[in-house]
Image (tube, helix red, strand yellow):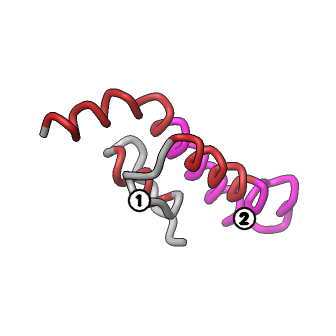
Amino acid sequence: LQFRLLFPFSLASNFAILGLKPSVPLPDVKRKYYELAKLYHPDVNAQDATAHRKFTEITKAYRYITENYEQERASFRTG
């Protein structure tokens, strides 16, 4: 996965941070977030400075998706 600070550009950008397509349902987003959060959590990777940055980006992306999911989905459907 490539991590870039894209928060809060768009729903699609934040899905990309999690390595997902925007068509993925919200429960799958949550599952992927927990998987990545465990992998990059600073408590698990105390000596890895990039892990903290990645964890922060993952968390921001997940937060943006969950807060804007329904609104953005509605705009995708209406075109």
- The residue that appears at 38% across and 52% down in the rendered structure is 23
Question: Element under label 1?
Answer: loop
Image side of residue 13 versus residue 74, left or right: right
Separation of disc 1 and disc 2 at Cα?
A: 28 Å
Q: Position of residue 54 (x, y in %)?
A: 62, 59
Image side of residue 30 versus residue 3, left or right: right
- The residue that appears at 53% across and 58% down in the rendered structure is 18
Foreground of the two, 1 or 71: 71
Residue type at the position of mark 2 = Ala
Q: Residues within 10 Å of mark 2 (few under 14, many from 20)?
A: few
Q: Position of residue 5 (x, y in %)?
A: 45, 55
Tell me: residue 25, above or below residue 72.
below
- Magenta stretch: includes residue 74: no
- Which secondary structure is most common in the magenta stretch? helix
Between discs 1 and 2, the one toward the N terminus: 1
Q: Position of residue 53 (x, y in %)?
A: 63, 57
- The residue that appears at 56% across and 48% down in the rendered structure is 29
Q: Which residue is mark 2?
A: 49
Q: Which residues are magenta?
A: 38-63
Q: Position of residue 24 (x, y in %)?
A: 45, 51
Q: Which residue is mark 1?
A: 21
- Report the disc number at residue 51: none
Residue type at the position of mark 1 = Lys
Name the quarter where the C terminus is drawn: top left
Tell me: residue 8, above or below residue 16.
above
